[in-house]
Amino acid sequence: MTGRIRVNTEELRRVAAELELIAPALRDLGSRVQSSTLLETFDPRYAAQLSGQVQPEGAYAGSEANLCAEQHEGFSQRLLEIARRFEEADLATSQDMEALYRVLQAAIAAQEETAFAPGWLLRGGIPPWVERWDWLDMSEEDRQQQLEYYRQEWAKFQAGRTAGSFREPQQDTAYLEEMFKIYLYGLPAALFDPRTGKQTEPYDPDHELSDKPALPDGTSTYLNDAGQNRFTKYQYQDLTDYYERLRSRGMLEKLGLGELPEGVDPEEWSRAHHNLCGLDAVGQATGAEDMFQTYVAYAGEDQAMLVNGETMSPNEVRNLYRELGWESEHISRFKGSEVHWSDSNPAAYPTFGQVEEKLGQGYVITALVGVDKGTGFLSAAESSTGHFVNIVETMETRDGTELVRVYNSMHHREEVYTWGQFDAVWRQAGGNSGGQGVIAKPPAPDG
């Protein structure tokens, strides 16, 4: 598809000229910080003591300034070339435009981070997991070689991950850096049994892919008469208390719950509900502001589940997605299921590649797995119980280890598991039929 593109080439040339002017200033700065006269500005009592630290730092800062100057000059020339191309032709294919846009992004991001790459990778700084003095001890040639290696691996890292597009991700450079380190070096060894190599607990990331609905922390919100916590998991809720807290703070109206559907009465709901994982998974996937909104939406169809503390079936999870306007299907290995993972072999368990494919198609996967009620970690033990989680991202590390990121309502957080571990808990499924779940995606933008 082609279209007419209007570009202000004079503005491109103006920015190019500004970048060209910055370069000499950067070179002058580099020369001054590398100068042997730098120490003359120090108190003579400390100059000798500090020289061993200041001079290497000055040399490094100087080389960085010179590198930035070269980058500014290079970006300036690229912008001029872009302006020339647009002046010669006013039509470009979408593919051409994307390529040109990437060049423009690079120029704008010469000294800034972008949503796609951290500043140290763009401008040649110190990787966050490398000690500063270790980096400074390397020769300039070795540093550049290391950076080039990281840049090449960064491209492979980005190509090897599939983040679900059913929600607008909030990923930033800190999130990507954390996952890039995992891509390079794998999950921390402390998460694995040294004898069997099996993952014993999930990786709890510092940065999450998507924001979460507000939800009271069940481990600290609800107290008994002795002032002790009533529940042991974030997911567990006193629903009547939850409702009263929202009402007392005037939050019901703000959440669009000022008038509840006919027949819905949260004052009758369970005071100790331990089976909210299906509702929480839907709330997280659909981007509810507060989890209570999802509870009310389901209560309009099946209030008894909230009154009696009942569990949900995959079909009930599917129906809730549909009630909220999403396209949704129950996917399983059952002969009569709506959708199978493999058309040629309906009884086959899902593979990593099939999960990756569904995410790439815009689906969230709400999987029925097993969970250890004591730890709240996903588990393949026979004592585990059924539990719904959302698969929100897949990734393959440099050494080929396949990883999945899930939302686990037990701890109301995202967690990372190896595919080997996740496959095992999905097959066991807390004693349910393994490999089943719900796939859902939001309605198209045009409704």
Image (cartoon, rainbow, N blue to C red):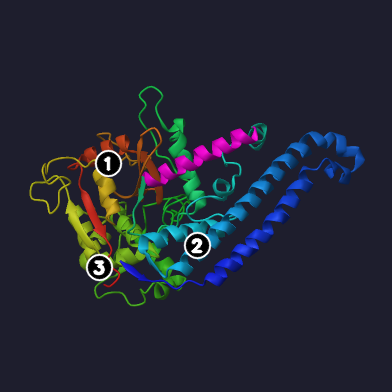
Q: Are marks 2 and 1 in contact (CB under 8 Å)?
A: no
Q: Is residue 58 left or right of residue 314?
A: right
x%, y% of residue 432? 19, 43
Say which amino acid is labelled 2. Answer: Ile
Q: Which mark is residue 325?
A: 3
Q: Position of residue 265 (x, y in %)?
A: 29, 70
Q: CA distance from mark 1 to mark 3?
A: 28 Å
Please tell me whether mark 1 or mark 3 is closer to you in this view: 1
Return the x and y of residue 182 as percentages of the image width and height. 45, 39
Q: Which residue is mark 2?
A: 82
Furthest-left residue in view? 336
- 437, above or below 100, in the image: above
User: Depth check: 340 or 106 in front?
Assistant: 106
Marks 2 and 1, how far apart in space?
42 Å
Answer whether residue 148 is magenta in the image: yes
Quadrant that contains the N terminus: bottom left
How many marks do you count on the picture? Answer: 3
**Label 1 or label 3, whichever comes before in sequence order:** 3
Q: Residue furthest toward the top?
A: 195
Residue at x-position 66% and y-position 52%: 69
Q: State the image coordinates of residue 389 (x, y, percent, origin top left).
A: 31, 49
Quadrant of the rendered structure where residue 439 is? Answer: bottom left
The answer to whether the residue labelled 1 contacts the one labelled 3, judged by CB atoms less than 8 Å apart, is no
> Does residue 211 appear anywhere in the picture?
no
Residue matched to label 1? 352
Q: Which residues are magenta?
A: 139-160
Camera sees residue 150: yes
The mark lying in front, picked from 2 and 1, is 2
Which of the numbered marks, if any, corresponds to residue 60? none
- The amino acid pointed to by label 1 is Phe
In three-dimensional space, the C-alpha distance between marks 3 and 2, rounded to whole angstroms, equals 44 Å
